Image (cartoon, rainbow, N blue to C red):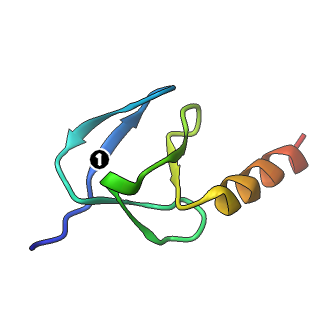
Amino acid sequence: MNKKKAKLVYKHNSFDIIEEGNFVICAISGKEIPLNQLAYWNVELQEAYYSPLEVNTRFKSLNNKK
């Protein structure tokens, strides 16, 4: 099976696939996230996250800029 990075548009409770693929990349860790396991993303930043740990890291970094 060939792996290909997907391009998505993240919405509040879903995402649209713009370019077909098997995975996206976590904006924090750089890990591959299979689309069938994608559960965490930020609509405003249009970023995907591997787990709640990466979500928390991004949240803290955004709050430190304020």
Residue 17 relative to residue 59: left or right: left
Q: Nearer the viewer, residue 7 or 11?
A: 11
Q: Nearer the viewer, residue 35 or 58?
A: 35
Q: What residue type is labelled 1?
A: Lys
Rendered view: 6 above or below 17: below
Q: In this view, does 30 lie to the left or right of 59?
A: left
| Residue at 69% across, 62% down | 53
Which residue is at a point 89% across and 50% down the rendered structure image? 64
The N terminus - image quarter: bottom left
Considering every residue shown, the one lying at the far left of the view is: 1
- Residue 56: which quarter of the image? bottom right
- Would residue 63 appear left or right of 50 to someone viewing this image? right
Q: Is residue 2 above or below residue 46?
A: below
Disc 1 target residue: 7
Residue 21, position in %: x, y? 20, 55
* Residue 13 against residue 41 in the figure, above or below: above
Q: How crowded is mark 1: few (under 14 residues within 10 Å), some or many (20 or more)?
A: some
Give coordinates of residue 45: x percent, y percent: 57, 39
Residue 62 placement (x, y as % from top left) = 79, 46
Q: Position of residue 18 (x, y in %)?
A: 23, 38
Numbered-mark total: 1
Query: Which element is circle 1 on?
Result: strand
* Residue depicted at x 51% and y 26%: 12
Q: What residue occupies the far top of the structure in this picture?
A: 12
Picture quarter with the C terminus:
top right
Figure quadrant of residue 14: top left
